Image (cartoon, coloured by chain):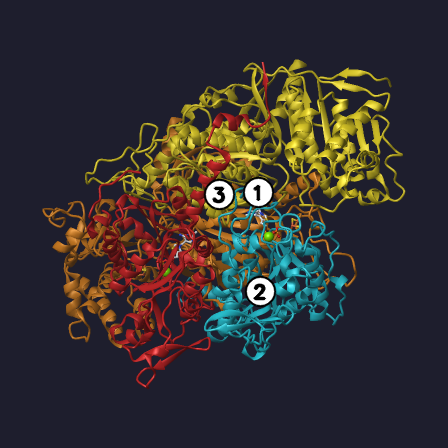
Chain colours: A red, B yellow, C orange, D cyan
């Protein structure tokens, strides 16, 4: 690996020479631009950054980043990233996937990546639709959705991506959205800083096939009442301080702070508490605020580190490589 | 019979017994000792499909065949000269294939009522009472003799019986004049920490040997050293040789090995073997499935490693999408298919050559890639090394075909020294100066090979992907003419791999012969024996064996077209033959066997003679 | 020019504009009206690869071509006679391919500075000032005229401009003497609930028509009715026809349709179409991936349904393991591959014929299965029906090859009535008497077909699986000879499918001709035109088109071998040709185009004439 | 479907004519025999029962059952079962899978089956090893395990199968083991009775490649201290009444009942409480008792039922099938 002189990048240094070809108004643009803004702040040499994606509108992302990149095949980016990270643990690897790519065809690789805890960052652009194939329901679409492939309404109960990630023993789980650039950048930064697989669900508007899917979480007027911004150590309040969440037994309960409920009784956000994280992931109903931010974080050994350690251990235990003696094996004989 | 010594040019012994009887151990010890004694040899184990099929039944019989001699040994032998049968089921399964005049060594304790019944003999049948009289029998109550030999050891009956295999092995060592020392050494290494077990095993071995010595009227055999080319030898199975070939290629290319695999019979042993050599910086990744294995390998290849994945049957089906990606990306990748009986789950523990067409054509779109086939257990080393060389130097995925027979079979291998292995030179990109011109990852050299620029190299940042790409820049391109150009460039790049081949050599015979037998894969040995025999009888038969199946050698058409008759024996319903007919319009005929087991040289000889006489 | 009327035998119009310009709607309305007017026709849409590529750019141009006439129309036409260009990018992309003497209809508003720049013209370039003088131009400020026509409606500017396409359509209706009524009916159905939009669309259409009427010096064209065989017709695209063929097969076999798919271009429309017909008891299952789709289909087939799955490119790679299972189980299954440009993700929106070898050989083990190819959009109906028939009656998976060109192209279809469709008779097992003999699921009839016994049928309980099975009983068997027998039985069963074929017919010409052009898939039309032209000029050229690619017809070898020369045009690097050379040892030559777009008849004619003259 | 006269079956009626070929001593035998005992009690006609499996030792199961069966391909049994159930909702379908088959290659199909809630029963024979391929670590093997493919110890952090199922929105989650026939039968019965996908993890001893993996849960002397038998409505006690579990805040706490802790303070098992279910699934450490029995159950519409309803709705909305008019379409014309 080349030692690069410390560079200060600007956002545009991360912009490739390829024309961006998403539909005008697509939420992907905002994510791209926040990514290009965040990277200079992270201080990673450009040549050490790799974007790996599957297939989907979202998966075109690598083409637009002036870094190394691979637009692989549908659903397999987590596996590609695993191999790449094992090959070169110094790289900063970003997996870009969609709700179809990551949870439909690629759900298994994603789950295995999470349990193994390979130190890569996964951004799942969830637009609750298959964009690139022009609008079929996805595994995150609500049941009963009318789409091209479900003219009488879809039958499938959707995945809850955060619960799925937690159930797969993810060590970092967060949620953010395309329309809140500051929040998005903060989450991206936290994801990169976490050692282990960072799973970030990004709500992304597909204005062509599923416009407004997340409107209540982004619309100026509605978002306060429908989103819950998580801050470690802080009580869970929303609706501009009017409401809060407390834990009643094992169940979350929305309380009206105006009605004399005290901040002190509220649930304090602790991203290291797995049960709280699980409860936060289950805030998924229409009358519950949707949690945004860091849901869960845990320190755990990373896969590629364990693999590197094993290579070292092997050199200690077995000895240095010696091809001639390896080929000779234990029982050789000479014919003369 | 008197205590006489007979010198034989070669012998085939088939060990058979229950899965729990230690047949594989006895077989591999006999092999090891025989190799050290300087014979040429070839072996083939035959496992039951179940982990442990029901004891005493025919389905549960485990077999191990060794063919060894003072002359060149090409196959594990067809019909055995000697059958070792530890029980009635083993006897029943194998007695029919023994050569006339052959020898049977059996443990009479394995022929009691229970065992006869389990083996499927009727209540009235008594195989030992109705022995074929053209055979010679050693009926030994091994179980009893062995128990007696160990009577004073602090071991239960079950534990005592566990070393029955060593008793028989000792007896065979006596019969064939083999030294005990190599096996005694092995036992020490294995059981040093369990002194009683170690003692039991040693005693059983010696007791068997001694038994041979004490019974009278015994013919013993001598097999002289083989005249092998001088050099250092070891015995090796195909899967181990293949693993070593990959490690050697890693050392000689300076690229760390990244092996990703998902367990599957008969490929799993490559994963097992490689995971023992992490001191070479070789990483092994046991993936969640074959798709993850190949795509992780692609990731590692993008990262600059010698990436390899191996599988079999259904696993190969799953890798085809990834193969297409690797081909489109033009990244080095070795995909090993240790073929087994198909289709579908098929016959997992049996051997077959029925995935050749899949290797050639089994991808969507125009997607040619080099296909190589190994022809013997030891040849798996060279073929793996060559596959890695082609992948790395030509920036392409390569399919290497092995099979269950090569994977588990063994033979002496004159292993090379490091310097005898040519260095492998992947087209690594030089570090770029920090100017602003975007890197062009799909520029090509005169062999049409692109550079390998690795993440971490400043100034070479670039993006690759599975969409069609523009010539040179690699940008996504939907342009019609560009697509045609790229399809042809990728095809020509693969064709140019053939420029590296040495001139095609016949294995036996010459262009003046009338019949050419063309083979690929593990049939090399059986065809060699058949052709040798025919040539000795004066028949004009030549032999050609293909290691590089795609792209074909440039001198192949002329060679093939010079023979009036061509026979293509394959362990499938005809696959290579279709390539030859199609590409060279030769009216080749097939000889096909689809039984999950290798050809006998006789079968090939019969067919060839028929063709010659029909002419 | 005077207001004259010219009668033409046929015309090719290419509509082009931005993705948002309503090109596909205008094209399909023109098609519908033209079909109702009694012309023969053929259409082909050409979408950009991106959902919405950047507005105004060449990459964002959406195209729709229609070829219609009073004579038989075989293809959507090569070079167009008429280009409709809604903006500069559409003009730039297509102007080069227009026929000499052709007509251009363009919206001048689409040629302003911004549009010229987006289309990639330099600041000095002015395409309209440098018009090729062999063409005839209608430069209309459509945008302005259309806005004026709608000036008093309560609509924003953007909304007004949305019906520009209808203005142009109205103008074309005037030029080609087409009635407005069918489109007016369509607009009513579509916009009834939005009165203002409805009104705007109607007005635009009429305004365009009127515009034609008012400008002077205009040549109008008349295209007489085509002499189509009498019957009822409709216009149909390949994907719709294919879906209807499956539904028809479901009705005529009495087996409910189970369609499992995972979206992928260009196969997704089959899922969309079938999901609209659940009143036929047809279930559509949008699976999590292609593997789940095919294995769910296998489950449904085991349950007794007509199981179908469709995909393309990379999806086909993923289905190969499942195909092997279906083949081993001997269950009916139709797998549709709507081919697109490959390899890997390739060119998703482009057409290609490059998955034939994968269909034939792309599985591990010996795994032959019937392969069929549709040859025109309407033919997708018959081919799907035939694929389902073979699958159901012969208890086998079948691969049906379509492609992007057939999928989205359309033509008039003389649809059959229900009775004209032969009933399909799957070999359903009769209910068993309750005796204790275990059912033998792999017993076969004289066509080697096994019975279909369905869960829920008492007394027929049985187990199937992917391991090799014993003849008749279907029990797991590792027996060598049994394996060979089963491999051969499965292969022969597939061969016997050819017994159902009618005698092979040449499309044109006779055995006495010197050159045979053999095609498959959507090239039928282009080859037909080329051969017709050559025959008219007296060249001895015949045409053969294969629907059943595997197993080949029994009379095929004799037929092929009777021609001194054979040309095989394919939209790939040569695939069918290898089958023909291999199986019939004919020195066929290939004509290959790998550009993601169909052959022009000229290209085929040129090559054929070259061959004839070389002779 | 045939109407079968009501039959009373015996266990042996469910035994096929094929010789059972697992290793002597394998835990699979016990599961097979309990299954053959349970089925007669369920009163389902034999011809309406189908066993569907993937590949693995466990997946040989269907061959030994005298019912309909399919030994499919590795990891895909959930998808096969989905298609089969949709084709014939009257069937009682049992998916037999292993920790490799179901969680390695087949994890995605399993997760999608669970979220869709197809009414089939999934038995995952977890022996924490790949049996059929002769002993490699599996996705449920403990980290650091020495096997043929991990001579220096495995690197993978294992899945927690119950958490994975809960994270995939399973509607029925239970755990049992090969060595407790009564418990096994009860769980099988409950699984069949549940409408929706029943996910049952069965601890199964592979005495050849992973002997004793669950010994502390089955061994007479150890099991009391290491297992927690769940009974709905009952407090969580174990170690023969000596110990119990209570919930302290959101964390489970083991209490010594001898030390004056009261049964009343204990956690009461409520399989309908998703948070409790999640906590039970996380009792996974060495010093925590392993929960056995029904962990979670929820009533939710089944997929095949929704599909059937849609077929009916389609007949209402679109009308009865009429092939001639379908083929004619909306815009046909006649040439005479
Ligand atoms: C193996 C395979 N199957 C199917 C497809 C077609 N396909 C491309 S993207 C996609 C889904 C896209 O959805 P999502 O991942 O949500 O991405 P989005 O376009 O919404 O960003 C599908 C089904 C493919 N390319 N490869
Ligand atoms: C596609 C494919 N890959 C790999 C295999 C090999 N294989 C058979 S079973 C198995 C794993 C078995 O483990 P598990 O599911 O835990 O079942 P067990 O044998 O332990 O019961 C593997 C890897 C296969 N048959 N098919
Ligand atoms: S289809 Fe949707 S997700 Fe895709 S680019 Fe367009 S707006 Fe974005
Ligand atoms: S290998 Fe293990 S799981 Fe497989 S049959 Fe033997 S004991 Fe059972
Ligand atoms: Mg999406
Ligand atoms: Mg297991």
Q: Earlier in the sequence, mark 2 or mark 1?
A: 1
Q: Nearer the viewer, mark 1 or mark 3?
A: 1
Relative depth, front residue between C345 and A7: A7
Q: In this rendering, do the residues under marks 2 and 1 share a single chain?
A: yes
The reply to whether residue C34 is visible in this rendering is yes
Please identify the residue farthest to the left as the structure is shown.
Answer: C124
Q: Which residue is mark 3?
A: C358
Which residue occupies the extreme front position in the image?
D259
Tell me residue C150's x, y (percent). 18, 71
Q: Tag 3, which secondary structure? A: helix
Residue C417: tell me if it is visible: no
Q: Chain of mark 3?
A: C
Please tell me whether mark 1 sits on a helix, a strand or a loop: loop
Q: Which of the two discs, 2 and 3, sits closer to the camera? A: 2
Viewer-nearest residue: B365 or D119: D119
CA distance for labels 1 and 3: 35 Å
Residue occupied by mark 2:
D289
Mark 1, ligand 2, within 8 Å: the answer is: no
C-alpha distance separating marks 2 and 3: 53 Å
In contact (CB < 8 Å): disc 1 and disc 3: no
Circle 1 sits on which residue?
A: D148
**For residue B233, side relative to residue B119 (left or right):** left
Q: Where does residue A205 sit, x and y in percent of width and height?
A: 31, 64
């Amino acid at each position: 690996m080349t030692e690069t002189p410390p560079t200060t990048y600007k956002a545009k240094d991360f912009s490739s020479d390829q024309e961006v070809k998403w539909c005008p108004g697509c939420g992907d643009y905002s994510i791209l631009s926040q990514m290009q803004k965040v990277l200079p702040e992270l201080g990673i040499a450009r040549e050490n950054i790799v974007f790996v994606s599957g297939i989907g509108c979202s998966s075109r992302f690598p083409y637009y980043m002036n870094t190394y990149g691979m637009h692989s095949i549908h659903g397999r980016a987590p596996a590609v990233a695993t191999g790449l990270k094992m090959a070169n643990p110094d790289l900063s690897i970003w997996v870009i996937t969609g709700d179809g790519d990551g949870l439909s065809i690629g759900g298994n690789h994603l789950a295995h990546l999470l349990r193994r805890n390979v130190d890569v960052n996964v951004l799942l652009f969830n637009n609750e639709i298959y964009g690139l194939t022009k609008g079929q329901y996805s595994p995150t679409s609500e049941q009963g959705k009318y789409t091209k492939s479900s003219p009488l309404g879809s039958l499938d109960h959707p995945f809850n991506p955060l619960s799925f990630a937690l159930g797969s023993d993810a060590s970092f789980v967060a949620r953010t959205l395309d329309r809140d650039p500051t929040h998005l950048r903060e989450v991206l930064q936290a994801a990169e800083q976490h050692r282990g697989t960072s799973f970030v669900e990004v709500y992304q508007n597909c204005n062509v096939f599923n416009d407004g899917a997340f409107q209540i979480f982004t619309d100026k007027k509605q978002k306060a009442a429908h989103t819950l911004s998580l801050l470690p150590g802080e009580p869970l309040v929303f609706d501009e301080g009017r409401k809060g969440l407390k834990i009643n037994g094992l169940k979350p309960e929305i309380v009206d702070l105006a009605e004399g409920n005290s901040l002190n009784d509220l649930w304090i956000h602790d991203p290291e508490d797995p049960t709280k994280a699980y409860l936060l992931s289950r805030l998924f109903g229409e009358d519950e605020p949707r949690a945004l931010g860091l849901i869960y974080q845990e320190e755990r050994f990373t896969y590629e580190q364990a693999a590197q350690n094993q290579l070292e251990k092997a050199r200690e235990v077995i000895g240095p490589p010696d091809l001639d003696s390896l080929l000779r094996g234990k029982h050789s004989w000479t014919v003369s | 019979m008197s205590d006489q010594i007979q010198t034989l040019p070669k012998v085939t012994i088939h060990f058979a017994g229950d899965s729990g009887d230690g047949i594989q151990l006895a077989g591999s010890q006999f092999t090891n000792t025989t190799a050290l004694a300087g014979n040429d040899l070839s072996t083939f184990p035959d496992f039951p499909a179940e982990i442990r099929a029901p004891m005493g039944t025919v389905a549960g019989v485990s077999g191990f065949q060794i063919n060894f001699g003072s002359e060149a040994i090409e196959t594990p032998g067809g019909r055995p000269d000697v059958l070792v049968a530890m029980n009635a089921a083993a006897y029943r399964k194998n007695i029919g294939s023994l050569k006339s005049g052959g020898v049977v060594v059996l443990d009479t304790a394995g022929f009691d009522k229970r065992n006869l019944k389990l083996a499927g003999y009727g209540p009235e049948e008594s195989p030992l009472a109705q022995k074929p009289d053209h055979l010679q029998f050693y009926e030994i109550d091994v179980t009893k003799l062995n128990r007696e030999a160990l009577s004073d050891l602090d071991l239960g009956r079950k534990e005592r019986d566990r070393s029955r295999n060593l008793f028989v092995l000792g007896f065979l060592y006596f019969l064939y004049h083999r030294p005990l020392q190599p096996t005694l050494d092995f036992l020490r290494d294995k059981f040093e920490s369990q002194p009683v077990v170690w003692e039991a095993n040693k005693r059983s071995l010696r007791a068997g040997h001694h038994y041979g010595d004490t019974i009278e009227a015994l013919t013993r055999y001598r097999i002289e050293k083989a005249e092998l080319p001088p050099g250092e030898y070891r015995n090796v199975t195909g899967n181990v040789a293949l693993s070593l070939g990959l490690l050697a290629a890693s050392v000689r290319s300076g690229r760390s090995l990244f092996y990703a695999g998902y367990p599957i019979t008969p490929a799993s042993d490559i994963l097992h073997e490689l995971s023992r050599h992490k001191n070479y910086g070789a990483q092994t990744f046991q993936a969640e499935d074959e798709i993850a294995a190949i795509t992780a390998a692609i990731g590692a290849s993008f990262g600059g490693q010698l990436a390899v994945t191996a599988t079999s049957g259904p696993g190969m089906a799953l890798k085809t999408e990834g193969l297409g990606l690797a081909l489109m990306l033009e990244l080095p990748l070795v995909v090993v298919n240790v073929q087994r009986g198909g289709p579908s789950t098929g016959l997992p523990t049996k051997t077959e050559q029925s995935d050749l067409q899949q290797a050639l054509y089994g991808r969507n779109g125009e997607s040619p890639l080099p296909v190589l086939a190994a022809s013997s257990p030891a040849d798996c080393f060279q073929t793996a090394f060559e596959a890695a060389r082609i992948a790395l130097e030509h920036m392409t995925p390569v399919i290497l075909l092995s099979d269950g027979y090569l994977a588990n079979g063994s033979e002496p291998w004159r292993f090379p020294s490091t310097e005898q292995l040519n260095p492998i030179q992947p087209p690594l990109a030089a570090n770029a100066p920090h100017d602003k011109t975007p890197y062009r990852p799909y520029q090509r050299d005169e062999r049409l090979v692109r550079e390998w620029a690795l993440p971490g190299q400043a100034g070479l940042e670039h993006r690759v992907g599975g969409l069609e790409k523009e010539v040179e820049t690699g940008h996504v391109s939907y342009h019609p003419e560009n697509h045609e150009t790229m399809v042809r460039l990728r095809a020509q790049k693969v064709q140019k791999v053939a420029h590296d081949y040495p001139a095609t050599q016949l294995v036996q015979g010459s262009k003046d012969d009338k019949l050419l037998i063309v083979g690929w894969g593990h049939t090399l040995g059986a065809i060699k024996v058949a052709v040798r025999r025919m040539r000795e009888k004066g028949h004009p038969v030549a032999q050609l064996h293909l290691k590089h199946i795609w792209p074909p050698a440039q001198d192949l058409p002329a060679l093939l077209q010079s023979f009036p008759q061509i026979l293509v024996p394959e362990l499938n319903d005809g696959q290579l033959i279709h390539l030859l007919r199609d590409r060279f319009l030769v009216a080749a005929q097939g000889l096909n066997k689809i039984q999950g087991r290798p050809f006998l040289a006789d079968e090939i000889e019969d067919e060839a003679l028929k063709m010659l006489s029909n002419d």
